[in-house]
Image (cartoon, rainbow, N blue to C red):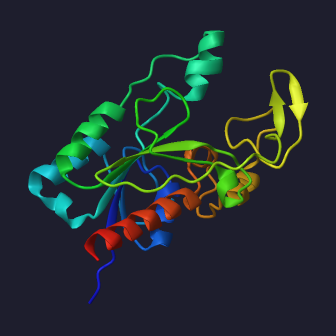
């Protein structure tokens, strides 16, 4: 009997990353500190780093093949260090990237750390964009790969603008803005369609999600790499 590889999805939100791994052939377990009734897979509610430390200490981490972490990114994301900083908006945010990496290193497993464009202190081993997968969002995301590696995808030229108001200018384009409200930002149905997410209609969850196409590609690349190593 063949057992599917299993991924632990930390800081899981509503499961954008999780669904991609599922589509790549993984069994998925999630963990998030907030209640996530829309999460489509088995799920532990609690502090992600405390849960990871517990799994390491008890040896339960060994049931996983890969760990994915999307720690909160408000401290170093593009909006915080760009527009918000220039306008004096926003407050202080905790940066959880370093403690997440420390525990992932201690786990002994291959891992993925995901962050948006900005100044987050991660290696940009892989950078993905919605245009690479024919999506209706750009949603650039960077991924640090621990204990494994893969090739980078070429970044295709964008086909136009993101629809909406920016710096006082209204533009039309083939992509929607899956964040915020007003100013031509995407509606909930538009975000669902643009990212390929059907199992939640909660705006906050959609604005934080990554398209499943990203982690489907990453999960497939990981499994292909592992097969090549053990062939």
Q: Nearer the viewer, residue 43 or 11?
A: 11
> Does residue 136 lie above or below 141 as drawn?
below
Tell me if 63 is positioned left or right of 19 in this view: left
Query: What is the quadrant of the C terminus in the image?
Result: bottom left
Residue most extreme to the bottom: 1
Residue most extreme to the left: 58
> Does residue 60 lie above or below 100 as drawn?
below
Tell me if 131 is positioned left or right of 90 in this view: right
Q: Residue at x 76, y 53 (%)?
A: 190
Q: Residue at x 26, y 73 (%)?
A: 230
Place of residue 184 in the rendered image (x, y in percent of width and height, measured from the top left)? 83, 37
Splitting the image into 4 quarters, where does residue 33 fall? top left
Place of residue 111 in the rendered image (x, y in percent of width and height, measured from the top left)? 32, 52
Place of residue 65 in the rendered image (x, y in percent of width and height, measured from the top left)? 28, 64
Instruction: Give the mark count.
Output: 0
> Residue 210: in sight, yes or no?
yes
Splitting the image into 4 quarters, where does residue 71 fall? top left
Q: Residue at x 64, y 55 (%)?
A: 201
Place of residue 165 in the rendered image (x, y in percent of width and height, measured from the top left)? 83, 30
Q: Residue at x 83, y 36 (%)?
A: 164
> Residue 5: in sight, yes or no?
no
Tell me if 184 is positioned left or right of 157 in this view: right
Query: What is the quadrant of the N terminus in the image?
Result: bottom left
């Amino acid at each position: 009997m063949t057992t599917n590889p299993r991924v632990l999805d930390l800081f899981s939100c509503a499961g954008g990353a999780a669904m991609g791994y599922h589509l790549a052939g993984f069994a998925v377990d999630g963990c998030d500190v907030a209640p996530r009734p829309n999460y489509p897979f088995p799920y532990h509610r609690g502090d992600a780093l405390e849960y990871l430390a517990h799994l390491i200490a008890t040896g339960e981490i060994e049931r996983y093949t890969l760990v994915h972490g999307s720690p909160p990114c408000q401290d170093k994301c593009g909006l915080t260090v760009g527009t918000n900083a220039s306008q004096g908006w926003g407050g202080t945010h905790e940066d959880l990237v370093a403690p997440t990496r420390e525990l992932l290193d201690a786990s002994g497993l291959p891992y993925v750390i995901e962050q948006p464009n900005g100044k987050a202190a991660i290696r940009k081993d892989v950078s993905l964009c919605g245009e690479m997968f024919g999506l209706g969002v750009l949603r650039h995301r960077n991924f640090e790969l621990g204990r494994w590696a893969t090739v980078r995808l070429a970044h295709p030229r964008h086909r136009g603008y993101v629809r909406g108001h920016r710096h006082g200018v209204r533009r039309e384009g083939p992509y929607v803005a899956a964040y915020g409200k007003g100013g031509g930002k995407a509606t909930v149905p538009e975000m669902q369609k643009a990212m390929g997410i059907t199992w939640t209609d909660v705006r906050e969850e959609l604005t934080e999600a990554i398209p499943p196409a990203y982690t489907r590609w990453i999960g497939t690349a990981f499994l292909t790499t592992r097969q090549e190593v053990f062939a």
